Image (cartoon, rainbow, N blue to C red):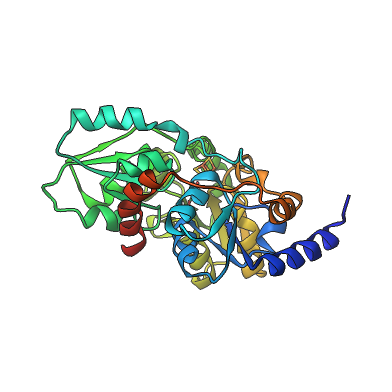
Amino acid sequence: MLERKELVEEIMYWKEKRNAVLLAHNYQLPEIQDIADVLGDSLHLARATTEVDADVIVFCGVHFMAETSAILNPNKKVLLPDINAGCSLADSITVEQLREWKKEHPNATVVSYVNTSADVKAESDYCCTSSNAVEVVNAIPEDQEILFLPDMFLGSFVQRQTGRENMHIWMGECHVHAGIEPQHIDTVTNNHPNADLLVHPECGCSTSMIYLSGEGELPEEKTHILSTGRMLDYSKQSSANEFIVATETGIIHQMQKQNPDKSFYAANPEAVCPFMKMITLEKVLQSLKEDTHVISVPKDTAEKARTAIDRMVAIG
Ligand code: 13P
Ligand code: SF4
């Protein structure tokens, strides 16, 4: 077994040899975050994927992210170091279910969260991420009926922000964010009453609403519903010194690294995404050496999904 230092050296050697880049999501293990060429939220990574100058992209994230990267880069090789790194939210709707839903609303515009399979994206008009979902919905004419999928909490958040009444929301959820409940936040806010609260929109809508309506322990101006990338920006720019973080706990590594003098508390320390944590240094090295696992999307699916993804990359 190689030591961590040797593993990192080997990865650097193979990265150069293959003209590869490592893209990593903010929920990755600390040791992966520390060697990433680009680290960010889903939107930032999707945009970066088209900008990097490389033959190979090693995607340290989950399957739908690597698939999106492969669709945007038909001429680059996209590798996912563990093929089982899926997403419970993406699994909450199949393409067959979407086709049935569309039949019930034949004139609706379909807005899919990026956390979906390529097949689902191919049946969608727009994709969005948590950082531009409000802007994407606002870009659609007001009288146009919308099917928003698959996250019910993000959907409710977008509906509140946009005031859209003609929006139908799929009842899917991420098991990690759904597990961050109001009582977790109550406990942490009681212990840290001066902290700002950063909430990912995939968290239970009740959580967001309680705090945004000012009925929770924290005043409204201290509650911020943000994508992971915007949480990082906010914690850097804010004059606050303490933050309660209601999302997957992996992001705290980066927050603490960027702000060594500030304090970050997980709303629920058990909010750990098992899929994100499947990517290890050993698997990244194996991926670079053995091409495990090449992510490819059938040409016709990729072509159909591309319009929705291009709109997502362009908006917000
Ligand atoms: P972000 O786009 O905010 O990074 O979220 C991605 C994700 O999977 C959240 O669970
Ligand atoms: Fe999917 Fe949830 Fe993991 Fe994000 S945290 S990748 S939505 S399972």
Q: Residue furthest left?
A: 143
Q: Report the quarter where the C terminus lies.
A: bottom left
**Residue 1, image x, y percentages:** 89, 49
> Does residue 209 appear anywhere in the picture?
no
Q: Residue at x 56, y 55 (%)?
A: 78
Q: Residue at x 61, y 38 (%)?
A: 84
Residue occupying the point 23% across, 52% down: 162
Left or right of 49 in this view: 15 = right
Instruction: Estimate the x, y position of residue 191 in percent, counting from the top left.
Output: 60, 49
Vertical relation: 288 (above or below) 260: above
Residue 227 lies in what quarter of the image?
Answer: bottom left
Residue 114: percent from left, percent from top: 41, 48
* Along the viewing direction, whichever of 314 and 187 lies nearer the viewer: 314
On screen, residue 72 above or below 270: below
Quadrant hosting residue 216: top left
Q: Nearer the viewer, residue 25 or 163?
A: 25
Q: How many marks?
A: 0
In the rendered structure, the answer to whether residue 142 lies left or right of residue 239 reads left
Q: Is 242 left, or right, of 129 in this rendering?
A: right
**Left/right of residue 30 with respect to residue 144 in the rendered view:** right
Is residue 272 visible in the rendered structure shown here?
yes
* Frontmost residue, 100 versus 300: 300
Q: Position of residue 95 (x, y in %)?
A: 36, 33
